[in-house]
Image: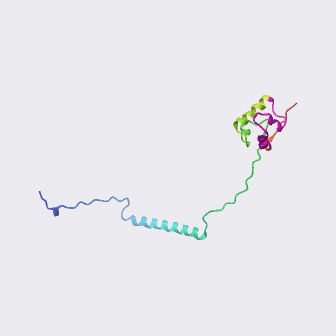
Amino acid sequence: MNDNVDDVEPTRSRTVLFLRRMDQPAIAVVLGVCLLLIGLFVFRLWKTKQGVIDIDHRSKQDAQLQVDLNLAPWPEFANLPGLGEFMARAIVNYRQQHGGFREIDDIKLVPGIGETRFKQIKPYLVISTPLDD
């Protein structure tokens, strides 16, 4: 056995590259150009101070929802302010049991529709099909 360290040949580790050595400069140039273009774009935005785009907003407009007391299904009533599904179904049930509404104020006869709730929904209510006497 030879204990001489000088005779041992060092082993080389071979590094595996994703790109060939001759492709690396081309990739470096492409990345450099991309960084340069991004820098120019940011500089131009900074120089012209075009950071945030201002958008003109229209004034808020209320939809003109009209609900016919004698024809509307409960989902239409549920869209009215102050009414949910429960009260909308109660209005339709009252209408079915009592034959409909003769005038808009008759909706106050539905249990749960008081003066406050009536004032909230009155602008949306219509009776386009009056009841026959």
Image point 74% across, 33% down: which residue?
90
> The C terminus lies in which quarter of the figure?
top right
Position of residue 99 measured from the top left corner of the image (x, y, whole percent) = 81, 30
Q: Residue furthest right?
A: 133
Q: Is residue 36 left or right of residue 109?
A: left
Of residues 120 and 1, the one nearer the viewer is 120
Q: Residue furthest bottom?
A: 47
Position of residue 115 measured from the top left corner of the image (x, y, whole percent) = 79, 40
Residue 114: in sight, yes or no?
yes
Q: Residue furthest left?
A: 1
Residue 128: in sight, yes or no?
no
Where residue 77 sits, quadrant-wise, is: top right
How many numbered circles are shown? 0
Give the colour scheme of this rendering: rainbow
Q: Is residue 113 magenta?
A: yes
Looking at the picture, does residue 44 appear above or below residue 125? Answer: below
User: Which secondary structure dominates the residues rendered in magenta?
Assistant: helix
Image point 71% across, 38% down: which residue?
75
Image point 18% across, 61% down: which residue?
8
Q: Is residue 110 magenta?
A: yes
Position of residue 78 measured from the top left corner of the image (x, y, whole percent) = 72, 39
Image point 14% across, 62% down: which residue?
4
> The N terminus lies in which quarter of the figure?
bottom left
Of residues 32 and 106, the one nearer the viewer is 106
Position of residue 132 measured from the top left corner of the image (x, y, whole percent) = 86, 31
Q: Which residues are magenta?
A: 98-122
Looking at the picture, does residue 36 appear above or below residue 76? Answer: below
Q: Is residue 28 left or right of residue 14?
A: right
Where residue 24 sits, quadrant-wise, is: bottom left
Where residue 29 sits, quadrant-wise, is: bottom left
Q: Is residue 124 left or right of residue 12?
A: right
